Image (cartoon, rainbow, N blue to C red):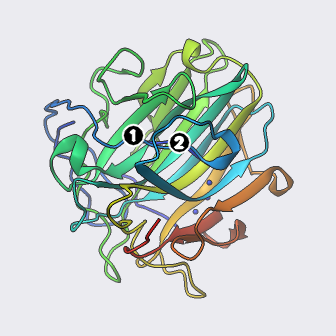
Amino acid sequence: MVRGYVGISIFVWFSLASCCLTSVESIDACGNTQMDEKNATLVRHVPWFVKTQDGRSNIISHYAMWHTVPGKYFGLRAEISIWASPNQTESQESGASLQIYCQDGGHYNMIEAGFHVSPSLYHNREVHFFTYWTKDSKSAGCYNLQCPGYVPTTGAALVPGQVVTPPSSYGVQDRYVRLSLNKDPNSGDWVVYRHDLETPSFLGYFPIGLCSKMPVIEALTGFVNYFNNTHGPPMGSGHFPNMENSDKKIAYFKHIKKYNSGGHTYDPVLLDMRNLADRSDCYKQDTLSLALARGYVFYYGGPSGCIG
């Protein structure tokens, strides 16, 4: 088991096995998978840069992210901190993910992998690994294995809908998973790997047909969704980034890397990156920067209580 180490953000939205953690920072894979797929109550909105009028004004969505400008990109890798939200209600969702948006005519297709708390989807308040895709930026899309799309590999170290436990504990323990989503240079499929185990573990893939065209936008995103008759849940640890930015207190994306067309990683080019916090009074992200022992990193989050 590889010990955890100390590492950065865009845009759209998001059942069951037990997964246990090591006594250090990185999350280990274990337990038996039990799939219990349910239809999601919450349908996510997209960020402003791919926004369309879809009539779903009863859902409020907010983001704290870093994303690329549209271009010829091939994927992302990052350590994503794992935070629970034990008081979250059926009308709320929160999480963090790697997202790829592929322009297709007048709209964007989107594929996504990450971690979220979604009581309306799973009927519990655990942290779950999830995948999501939509063929355009205004459709409801598809979570996990609810419909054909994402293809998990046999014996995957993480299966869509799997519980990830225990999460980080504020001021006590930092827990993360190092995840990648990138375009395979041979098949053209978008493959998902876990990188914090002894060797990289292939989790599955999104077929090329779900995201086949350029340009794309890549994003590392903290997000919340909630009905407009309630208030927003916590994002990340429930705390804003600050001068201290302790890994045991603030949610993060660390050791951020991008992929080239050959499947090799490189550091993000800051001139290609943009930040977005659409309600900075409720949720924030800080500067994407290079830090000692953390690589390219940014912190994000905010407390519950956001209205509108």
Please report whichever mark, 2 or 1, sits nearer to the chain's N-terminal start: 2
Residues at circles 2 and 1 in contact by the CB criterion of under 8 Å: no
Q: Amino acid at mark 1?
A: Val
- Quick check: can you spot residue 294? no
Residue 102 is situated, as x and y percent measured from the top left of the image, at: 67, 27
Out of 174 and 132, give the one closest to the viewer.
132
Residue 299 is situated, as x and y percent measured from the top left of the image, at: 56, 70
Q: Amino acid at mark 2?
A: Val
| Closer to viewer: mark 2 or mark 1 | 1
Q: Residue at x 70, y 71 (%)?
A: 287
Q: Which residue is mark 2?
A: 12
Asked where in the image residue 154 lies, by quadrant, the reply is top left
Residue 180 is situated, as x and y percent measured from the top left of the image, at: 53, 40
Out of 60 and 274, give the one closest to the viewer.
60
| Label 1 neighbour load within 10 Å: few <14, some 14-19, many 20+ | many
Instruction: Find residue 241 and name its label.
Output: none
| Label 2 neighbour load within 10 Å: few <14, some 14-19, many 20+ | many
Residue 144 is situated, as x and y percent measured from the top left of the image, at: 33, 30
Q: Residue at x 56, y 40 (%)?
A: 99
Out of 55 and 244, give the one closest to the viewer.
55
In the displayed structure, would residue 292 be above or below residue 296?
A: below
In the displayed structure, would residue 29 be above or below residue 149?
A: below
Q: Which residue is mark 1?
A: 43
Q: Residue at x 64, y 72 (%)?
A: 286
